[in-house]
Each structure stands twice: as C-alpha cells, then as structure tokens.
Amino acid sequence: MYRIDVDKQHAVIELVLDGLIRRDEMVTFVEELKAATLGLAGREVKVKADMRTFRPTSPEVAEMLRDVQQFGLHNGVKRVAEMVESQLAVLQLNRVARESGTDKILRRFTDDDAARHWLLHGDEQVISA
C-alpha cells in the first residue's frame, strides 16, 4: 500500500510506502509520484518518504524506485528525508539511492517533525543575538 500527499505551499511531497509493494502497485505509485513532482515544476521540491513499514522488495520494483528517484532529481527534487526502520530495507534503499544519485540529497530521520524541519529549512543555523 502507498499514499502520496502534496503540500503545494511548501513544495513538499509526503509519501508512505507500507509493507511489500508489488510491481502493479509500484507502476501506479510511480505514475502518481511523477505527476506530483511535475505539479511542482519550477520549484525546489522536497520529499518526505515514510518507509518505516516498507519491506524489501523484488529487484524489478527496486529498479522502478531507482528510476523514479532519477526522474525526481531531473525535475526539481532538492531534498529527500527518509524514515526507515528495517535494516534490510535500509540496505536495499541505500543501494537504490546510490544508483539513482539521490544519496547526495538524502537524510534519514526517526522523527516526522525533524524530517519536515530539515526539508523546509535545510541545515540553516539559528543565530542568537
């Protein structure tokens, strides 16, 4: 199962991948994610990917995930915050991110609020007077 929500005001795509994703479901997910990305064309797009319940998947589905990550990089995605719990999923997602080039703009988080803050504000330092 998956879910995609778009925060147009902040150019944030929030997605959830849950459980084992089969090829036919991934095809639909990729189409919707591409459409959401293109809907934010011309902006610095950020992605919050909640994959805490995602289970490692077939090589074909992993390849589709890599391809959609490359699509995002070429269409304005500037930051990706991932939340992952399974160490097996982390291994697979690390390989996918490395192959797509997303590893350069990716951070992993355990907390939703910290992930969203980084997406919106990056590594900016708070300067106190």
Image (tube, helix red, strand yellow):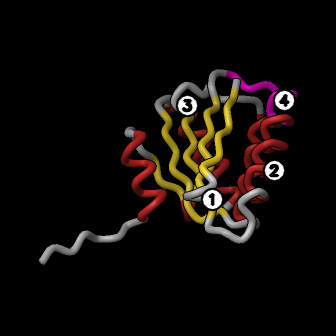
Q: Quadrant of residue 51?
A: top right
The amino acid type of the residue labelled 4 equals Arg
Label 3 sits on residue:
88
- Distance from the alpha carbon under mark 3 to that under mark 1: 19 Å
Q: Earlier in the sequence, mark 1 or mark 2?
A: 2
Tell me the quadrant of the picture where the N terminus can be found. top right
Magenta stretch: includes residue 22 = yes
Label 1 sits on residue:
102
The amino acid type of the residue labelled 2 equals Ala
- Distance from the alpha carbon under mark 1 to that under mark 2: 19 Å
Looking at this view, is 34 or 89 the one in front?
34
The amino acid type of the residue labelled 1 equals Thr
The secondary structure that most of the magenta stretch takes on is: helix
**C-beta proximity under 8 Å, tags 3 and 2:** no
Label 4 sits on residue:
23
Q: Earlier in the sequence, mark 2 or mark 4?
A: 4
Label 2 sits on residue:
35
Q: Earlier in the sequence, mark 3 or mark 1?
A: 3
Q: Residues within 10 Å of mark 1 (few under 14, many from 20)?
A: many
Q: Earlier in the sequence, mark 4 or mark 1?
A: 4
- Is residue 128 shown left or right of residue 53? left
